[in-house]
Amino acid sequence: MDKFTPIGLLLAAVAVVGGSILKGAGAGALVSSAAFMIVFVGTFAAICVHTPPSTLRHAVGIVKWIFRPPVASADGTIGSVLEWSNLARKQGLLALEPAVEEQDDAFVKKGLQLLVDGSEPEVLRSTLEVEIDAREHADTAAAKVFESAGIYLPTMGILGAVMGLMAVMQNLADPSKLGSGIAAAFVATIYGIGAANLFFLPAAAKLKAVIADRTRLREIIVEGLVGIARGDNPRNIEARLRGFLH
């Protein structure tokens, strides 16, 4: 689990709530059901309009990556490739057949199966690269849902503030209601700007970094499998794969 994400969210909450208290407004000033409705329900409505259902479902599925990114080690991946390379060099490609069944990752399993089936190196590369591109495109589109939310939220916050000020203008004859009314109006702005910059935009950036790491690992696997298919020396394969780590 990524420990920094919960710590960051906790510090964000402390910054907003603590700042409100230190400024004399109090934590209660940040609570507004109307502002919540306008900002968050409005933003979700906008996301539903512009996002295909499949992408939205995928975005919900990768939320866990923000807190618990997929565990994958580049060194471990290279080690596995070298193990397969040495085995294939000594006993032939068919010796990798048991390794196919041992794989939990469907991508690795597919690549090894193509290798065992005797696919030509370029056929192997092109087949797996198509899958890499498709997966990266789908994952990136899902990550952009959070980025879009981060763009819509501040605007919805301004909309909430304007609607709140409209309500205040209707009570100009009663000066006792002006101060609290104006303060409540700006809660929507806090919700929009705070949620966008303290969660949704950072979350989108985090997901894009995770996706980039996953893509790099798949590229390492493809390069390694192609090297095995060509019959390259395991040392040469290792040297080539280590280049991905710089």
Image: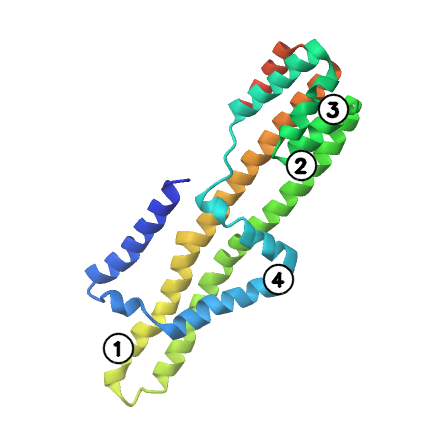
The x, y position of residue 51, in whole percent, is: 62, 59
Residue 15, picture quadrant: bottom left
Pointer 3 residue: 115
Left or right relative to 193: residue 205:
right
Q: Secondary structure at mark 1?
A: helix
Q: Secondary structure at mark 2?
A: helix
| Marks 3/2: CA–CA distance | 17 Å
Q: Specify few, some or many for label 3: CA neighbours under 10 Å numbering under 14, 14-19, or 20 or more.
A: many
The nearer-to-camera label among 3 and 2 is 3
Q: Earlier in the sequence, mark 4 or mark 1?
A: 4
Pointer 2 residue: 132
Left or right relative to 101: residue 74:
left
Which residue type carries mark 1? Gly
The x, y position of residue 230, in whole percent, is: 74, 16
Q: Secondary structure at mark 3?
A: helix
Which residue type carries mark 3? Leu
In this picture the colour scheme is: rainbow
Q: Earlier in the sequence, mark 3 or mark 2?
A: 3
Q: Which numbered circle lies on residue 179?
A: 1
Residue 10 in the image: above or below residue 3: below
Q: Earlier in the sequence, mark 1 or mark 3?
A: 3
Which residue type carries mark 2? Ile
The x, y position of residue 143, in whole percent, is: 55, 49
The nearer-to-camera label among 4 and 3 is 3
| Marks 4/2: CA–CA distance | 25 Å
The nearer-to-camera label among 4 and 2 is 2
Residue 45, picture quadrant: bottom right
Left or right relative to 231: residue 21:
left
Q: Earlier in the sequence, mark 4 or mark 3?
A: 4
| Marks 4/3: CA–CA distance | 41 Å
Pointer 4 residue: 50
Q: Specify few, some or many for label 4: CA neighbours under 10 Å numbering under 14, 14-19, or 20 or more.
A: few
